[in-house]
Amino acid sequence: MNSTTLNFSTSGASTNIITNSFGDIGNLEICVYSFNVLFGLPTHTFVIWLIMTGSKSGTASEFFFLNLSACEIGICLDGLLSVLAQCVSGLYNLSMLLQGFAVTGRPLFQCLICVERYLAVVHPVTFLKYKPLRYRLMCAAVAWIICLCSCLCCILLLILCTTDIYTCFFLQQFLLFLSINLFCCLAVLRALKQSGPGERGRAREEENHMKRRAFYLIFITTVSMIITYVPYVILGISVILKTQFVYGFWFTGLICYVMAGFVQPVLYLHRAGKLSHLCPNICIC
């Protein structure tokens, strides 16, 4: 999300969300967007290529992650257009259109991944029932339709409505998806922490190692989600209650949001063994 889409009067009254003249983003924002474009685009593209060129079973198991990476590319393009719009103002509306990927796309696909993991660990019978790829395809199709509708809503709200309405639009989605994600992640962490029946000896040791590795992966995912959305949630509540835009919350949220976009790709590349040559000493266990 861009700071130029939020405009507040000093009197505290709601104003149009589009600035009267084309707003400039600061140098710090340009650096953050440029970093996301320079490193995010090749990283997510590489992840998509790895998933697509992998085995059929691997593509099915990482299907939601594939869609998340595609959505992240849209977020990177949004940042690129935000920077280019400083020179070509006509790109600003297109940048606002792509904000639906950031407002709805990422949290929605993260939600699907968390629900899938929740079913796999807590309700394995139900997970096996809906494991075929066709169910993932249907869920992904619905998710993309929702995401595209969100893109249209973003540009309409930003042009026609007020700051409070747009803030409520992204705040309620962040709170909804964050609640679902936290519920699923905490339930998985609780299930992995419990010791279940199993064989003794080496088999039990290997099982505990796999559970411990999965526990740390889910824990990292949970922490990254909290860091991603909490600053924007605080900003949204501040906007609604006080009609006050706190730049510190927004810029902190921007940095957290951009950096959190690299967590899942790095974890996937680590699982795929692609980071062993660059970081041989890194081990999540």
Image (spheres, helix red, strand yellow):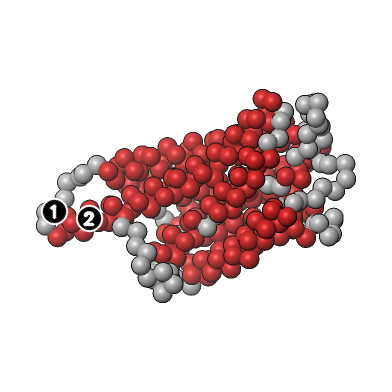
Identify the residue at the far right of this view: 21
Please tell me which residue lies in front, 62 or 177: 177
Looking at this view, is 277 or 70 the one in front?
Answer: 277
Query: Disc 2 marks which amino acid?
Result: Glu
Residue shown at 42% from the left, 50% from the top: 220
Which disc number belongs to residue 184?
none
Q: Earlier in the sequence, mark 2 or mark 1?
A: 1
Q: Is residue 215 above or below residue 234?
A: below
Mark 1, residue position: 199
- CA–CA distance between discs 2 and 1? 9 Å
> Dot 1, how many residues are within 10 Å of its Cα: few (below 14), some (14-19), or many (20+)?
few
* Percent coordinates x, y for residue 181 in the rendering: 47, 41
Q: Which residue is mark 2?
A: 207
Please say if the residues under marks 2 and 1 sit with CB atoms less than 8 Å apart: yes
Where in the figure is residue 54, as x and y percent of width and height?
A: 44, 71
Q: Nearer the viewer, residue 252 or 7?
A: 252
The residue drawn where x is 55% and y is 41% is: 229
> Front-most of 172 and 66?
172
Q: Secondary structure at mark 1?
A: loop
For the C terminus, the quadrant is bottom left
Element at label 2: helix
